[in-house]
Structure formats: C-alpha cells, structure tokens
C-alpha cells in the first residue's frame, strides 16, 4: 500500500472535480466531443473521477484497471463498429487512460493512446485541465476520422456529455 497515494485520494473529492471542471468546462468538452464525432463514425466518452473509494484504493487498483471498469459500466464497448473510445481521468493520481474498443485499438495500438495521454498529462501538470482534455478529444477524433470516416445519416450511439464520477 502506498501511503502517499492513499493520502492524495483522501484529499481529492468531488468538490475538487467540480472546481477543476466547472459546468462551462463540461459544456466545452461535450461540444468538442459532438464536433469531432461529426467527422468520424466513432464514439468518444470522457469520464473524470476525483478519487477511488476505500476498497479499490487499498486493493491497489490502478487508474488503468479502473478505466477498464468505467469503459464497461458506460458500455463504451457497445457500438455498432466496435469503435468506442473512453478518455478517463483519475484526478487524485493525475493519470489519464484511454481505453479503446477492439475495432479501433487493433488499428492503432497502445503506443498511440499512450502518446495522447502523455500530452494531456503535460497540460494537467501546467494546470490546463480543460485544454488538455480538449486536445485529447481532438487527437482521438483525428485517428477515428482516419479509420472510421463519417457516414451519412449515422446515429450518435452514446451521450456526448462528460461523466463526473
């Protein structure tokens, strides 16, 4: 058990998430998702979680493992062409994870997602949370547009609204 990590998770709550991502930021993120989805056939979800609950934290659950859980809970995998992408931010760890469904992940691979995450984390270290998320959404959108161009009459399969956990 990492005591420093436990202390960070205890000190970061939903109020911190709301301060870092006020409603205007969430609206900007929602708008960015909607705009990028107009140029591709994929689905992007953004979720931010302030901190982990006690049991998962003490069990050593990583941000990546939690992102996979959230990917499943939000049913990001449930798209017609298996091209859903979750951008997950665990604030207490300042860790971003991207989980992509098999339809897009097999075309890009782990390295592409990690590069986007690192760029976003650079913005977060500078205190630019909204800008970092917007840049990540646009980067993911560019990859989706290349591999899953927009179809005429395509349906939006998932909500664009960010999720604050």
Image (spheres, rainbow, N blue to C red):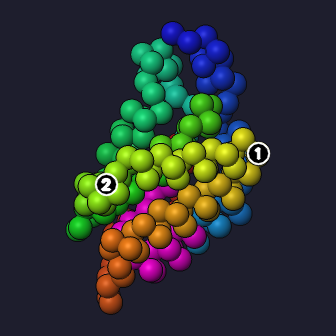
Give percent across and percent down for residue 53: 51, 25
Q: Which residues are magenta?
A: 32-48
Q: Earlier in the sequence, mark 1 or mark 2?
A: 2
Answer yes or no: is residue 10 visible.
Answer: no
Give percent across and percent down for residue 121: 63, 44
| Secondary structure under the numbered disc 1 in the rendered image | loop
Q: Residue at x 42, y 67 (%)?
A: 143
Give percent across and percent down for residue 11: 69, 25
Answer yes or no: is residue 5 visible.
Answer: yes
The reply, left or right, for residue 4 in relation to residue 52 is right
Q: CA distance from mark 1 to mark 2?
A: 29 Å
Residue 62 picture quarter: top left
Q: Nearer the viewer, residue 60 or 104?
A: 104
- Residue 107 image label: none
Give percent across and percent down for residue 69: 36, 38
Question: What residue is disc 1 on?
Answer: 126
The crowd level at tag 1 (other Cα within 10 Å; few <14, some 14-19, many 20+) is few
Q: Nearer the viewer, residue 114 or 12?
A: 114
Relative to 161, residue 70 above or below: above
Relative to 93, residue 2 above or below: above
| Secondary structure under the numbered disc 2 in the rendered image | helix
Residue 88: within the magenta?
A: no
Question: What residue is disc 2 on?
Answer: 105
């Amino acid at each position: 058990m990492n005591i420093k990590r436990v202390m960070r998770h205890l000190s970061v709550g939903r109020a911190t998430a709301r301060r870092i991502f006020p409603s205007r930021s969430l609206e900007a993120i929602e708008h960015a998702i909607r705009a990028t989805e107009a140029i591709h056939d994929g689905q992007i979800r953004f979720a931010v979680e302030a901190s982990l609950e006690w049991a998962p934290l003490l069990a050593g659950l990583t941000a990546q493992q939690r992102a996979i859980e959230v990917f499943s809970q939000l049913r990001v995998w449930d798209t017609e062409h298996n091209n859903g992408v979750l951008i997950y931010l665990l604030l207490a760890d300042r860790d971003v994870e991207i989980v992509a469904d098999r339809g897009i992940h097999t075309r890009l691979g782990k390295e592409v997602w990690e590069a986007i995450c690192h760029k976003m984390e650079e913005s977060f270290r500078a205190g630019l949370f909204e800008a970092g998320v917007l840049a990540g959404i646009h980067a993911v959108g560019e990859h989706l547009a290349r591999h899953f161009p927009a179809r005429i009459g395509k349906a939006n399969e998932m909500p664009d609204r960010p999720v604050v956990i």
